[in-house]
Image (spheres, rainbow, N blue to C red):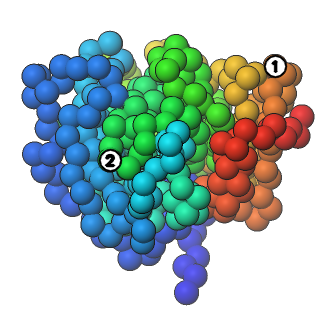
Amino acid sequence: MTIQLQPALRIIAALATVGFSFLAQSASAQTPFYQASAQELTGSPGTLIRSEPMAFAPVGAQAWRILYRSTGLEGQPTAVSGVAVIPAGEPPADGRPIVAWAHPTTGVVPHCAPSLALFVFQQMMGLRPLIERGAVVVATDYPGLGTAGPHPYLVGTSEGRAVLDSVRAARMLPGSGGARSFAVWGHSQGGHAALYTGLLAKTYAPELNLVGVAAAAPATDLITLMGDDFKTSGGKNLTAMTLWSWTRVFGAPIDKVVLAAAIPTVDRLANDCIESIFDIIERGAAEKTLEQTFLSVSNIATIDPWKTLAARNTPGVLPKTIPLFLAQGANDDLVQPAVTKAYFQRQCKAGSRVTMLLMPNVGHGFAGRDAANDAVNWMSERFAGNAAPSDC
């Protein structure tokens, strides 16, 4: 059965992984697994603090919930959680290739971590074919999801470091083989994270070998995204989460741009997760309040510190030595196709080899799902050492 959503709800769904199931349940309660002491934080970024087996992994694979060390925005040691899935059997002599999955928006508070979700494996787009091809798949929760919050939402450095350290951590798990070659693959917020992974890889994790970056409907222009979001009804949900997160992470004054009467609704939306169709419908109801009362300014993307923060967290052009796969739905109401095409053109101008997949009749919420097979094939070719194609 196909459920048709109203336009506003489709936009709310945009950064959520809604394609995996309409029967998803709320996230599990957090456990002490996610809590790291100051002593446990001592160690190199990417080293494991602890791991535990997970049930219901894809057939022929072992799944682990992991807690690993990373680096916070101010350079402080921090803990990040996630999930790693490893194919069965002995790894090849040179180890298994690793794919880092960067998830789309699930929320901005700790209990919204994908590793806590009942259907976490169904949310990892392309997981089964990647496992069948012998790849390790590791999926960070990002800082502040699972572990102590708040989550630095759409903060590129935070996302990129978490992804890179998840790859380091996955190399330490039984059966991975300790390979250094990896690709990163993400959707929406995760596409944003994937691009920042490419930007940070050489300096933050020079011992790793990034063979390619794959991103579906990535957030490549936060100033445009924030301005466009406010113009759409469902997009106000995403704007609310961004404002709630950035005021706590950066100290940006939310009361200067949000009306006092709207603060309770913003707080409510920030504390709810996006895991299923039911969450989306519930958020749609809460969002109607924001249609009446929300911002005290016409466009937050033109006002500092929000404008500066948006510019600071907009990904630049990747090094031309890193192949790039971009996927974009033609019917995307959130990340406009023209914005992704503009990023594609900037990459081409820089001399990069870029594949651009434009998917007719696909909206934002299903871009990761519908691009997964192409992304998996593209990443497999990069691991094989084949020259990257280019649509430039």
Vertical placement of 58 versus 350: above or below? Answer: below
Q: Percent position (x, y) of residue 343?
A: 75, 31
In which quarter of the view is residue 63 placed?
A: bottom left
Q: Percent position (x, y) of residue 55?
A: 27, 66
Q: Is mark 1 on a helix, strand or loop?
A: loop
Does residue 348 appear left or right of residue 332 in this picture? right
Residue with the mark numbered 1: 350
Characterize the local packing of mark 1: few (<14), some (14-19) or many (20 or more) Cα atoms within 10 angstroms: few
Q: Percent position (x, y) of residue 131?
A: 51, 59
Q: Residue at 70%, 20% (x, y): give it.
A: 319
Which three-letter amino acid code belongs to the residue tagged 1?
Answer: Ala
Does residue 338 appear left or right of residue 175 in this picture? right
Earlier sequence position, callout 2 versus callout 1: 2
CA distance separating discs 2 and 1: 40 Å
Residue farthest right in this picture: 392
Residue with the mark numbered 2: 174
Q: Residue at 32%, 23% (x, y): give it.
A: 45
Residue farthest front in this picture: 93
